[in-house]
Amino acid sequence: MQTTFSVTAGDFTKAGTASSQIKRMLKQLGVPQHTIKRIIVALFEAEVNVIAHSFGGEVQCEVTPEKVFVRVVDTGPGIPNLSLAMKEGWSTASEQVREMGYGAGMGLPNIKKSADILEIDTAANNHTDIRMTFYLNGDNQ
């Protein structure tokens, strides 16, 4: 099963829309609750990053009997220093984003902790492509 959602830059009123709908779908498919929680934590963080830092993007989710694969791709401007962005507490969020309760610098670290496999392709002045794999059989293959 596959599904795709658009994510609009700067529209925090829609933060969590894709993750909520994917959560509902995963429950209907019988994915274990502890796995759903890991997926939704990672997906929500990625979704908010697209809203806060990009020009917009999309969330793609594919569910197979073995795994859930989630891809979040934005249209730029990319992450200039991925090593710094992976450190807890490091953030480039604007003051406005921080005032809304986002931008604490935990997004990518939380994604890394939640996913069985995390791959990120990004560069300054380019798009960011985050690929997360969550295994359903309990083995982190």
Image: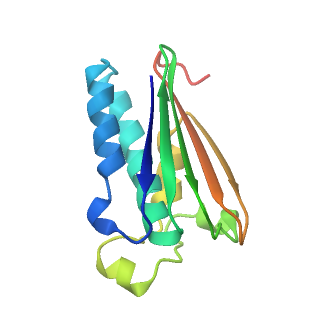
**In the image, what residue occupies the spot 50% across and 40% down?**
60
| Residue 80 figure quarter | bottom right
Instruction: Give the camera-side residue of 112 and 46.
Output: 46
Residue 37, given in percent of the width and then of the height, sits at: 33, 37
Could you tell me residue 30's position as x and y percent?
Answer: 30, 17
Against 88, residue 139 (above or below) is above
Check the picture and name the quadrant holding the C terminus.
top right
Pick the residue in front: 29 or 115: 29
Residue 106 makes an appearance in the image: no
Q: Residue furthest bottom?
A: 95
Residue lying at 36% horizontally and 84% vertically, measured from the top left: 96
Q: Which quarter of the picture shows residue 133?
A: top right
Residue 99 place in picture, x, y as percent = 31, 81
Left or right of 39, for residue 123: right
Point out residue 2 in the picture as x, y percentages from the top left corner: 47, 28
Above/below status of 53 relative to 39: below
